[in-house]
Image (cartoon, grey):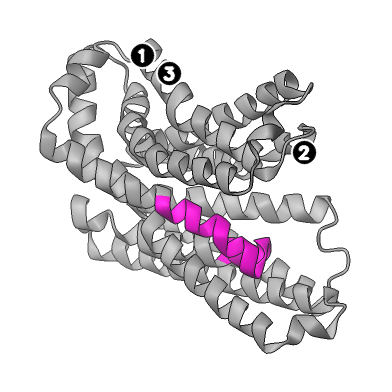
Amino acid sequence: MTEGVLLAVAAGIMLGLYALPEKFTKGFRYENTWSVFFLLTMFVVPIVASMLLIQGFGEIFGTMPAELWIKMGLASFLWGIGVMMWSRAINYIGLSLGFSIFIGTVILIGSLLPFLVDGLPDTDSLVLIVSGILVVLLGIILKGRAGLLREKDERSSKADQSQKGKANMSTGILIAVVGGLLATGFSYANAVGRPYLHEASQAQGNADWVTAVAVMFPIFISGGVVMTAYFAYQLTQKKAWEGFKTSAFASNFLWILLMAVFHYAASALFAFAAFKLGDSGNTVGYAIYNTACVVTAIVSGIITKEWISASPKAKRLLYAGVACMVLGILVIAAGN
């Protein structure tokens, strides 16, 4: 169990830090950086990793039941839409609030969803796991409140308090919640696909950890379809294709490739952590994984002085939120 918890935490930290290399790209607009990123992390990296690491790759996926392809594909497609909605919500309500609401919804629903596939654990474990999830959710709510106060502290014009601003806030919150609900498709796809893919992978003589790579293949390919379509539209709509014509393209590509590898590795590591955690692995691992990701993002924000202008009250709520997240992780681990 300890190994599974540590792996889930490590996966969350990697996910929380994967976007850091973006700060070193030059001459790229948002659409340029993230279109290349999603192309690499959803298609190139998973395909190369799967073909190199999975013995019997063709046999495993060639004989995979069509019903399972459909279940995993649809769930992963919804996950892709959810991620896109989250990026849109940030435009309305900012990173702090958007991240908190999105991940909070993902943890709450995504951690409970696998019970529909794997079944319920014993009563004592279930009570602890659900209690831990609620503590995590409380922490994310506190963090979201801290984000709102920080935005209020930094507000410099009366225009920000207009009715239009309130409407944008409501719209953004709704988009973040719906996006979080759809993004739980990742957890469902992992839960429903892992049993077959683990058995098929073992039959081909693969080690236990290879199952995580196998599970990620259909999830990323399916999720990548909607992401590719979205960014192709954005590049055309905002006339950003010209942004690729820069002398820094080669260095930018390497930084983005590093982002893609970290992002994919974090997801694969989570899938392996869920396997190591046993029957309740998807629930326990998913909560720990997303919480570690949020905590990492918060700590990174503090280090980079993102909260330097926030009021003492906002900072107290932030620290209380982090404390609840950590406590929630411990309770969930105890439940396992």
Mark sitting on residue 51: 1
Mark sitting on residue 49: 3
Q: Secondary structure at mark 1?
A: helix
Distance CA(mark 1)–CA(mark 2): 31 Å
Task: Tell whether 91 sits left or right of 279.
Answer: right
Task: State if disc 3 and disc 1 touch (CB < 8 Å).
Answer: yes
Task: Tell whether 254 sits left or right of 171.
Answer: right
Distance CA(mark 1)–CA(mark 3): 6 Å
Q: Residue at x 12, y 22 (%)?
A: 63
Give, as a single range, the part of the protein colored magenta: 81-100
- Residue under circle 2? 23
Instruction: Give the amino acid type for the residue marked by disc 2 in the picture.
Output: Lys
Mark sitting on residue 108: none
- Label 1 crowd (10 A; few <14 / some 14-19 / many >=20): some
Q: Residue at x 71, y 41 (%)?
A: 29
The answer to which of marks 3 and 2 sits earlier in the sequence is: 2
In the depicted structure, whether residue 327 falls above or below residue 188:
below
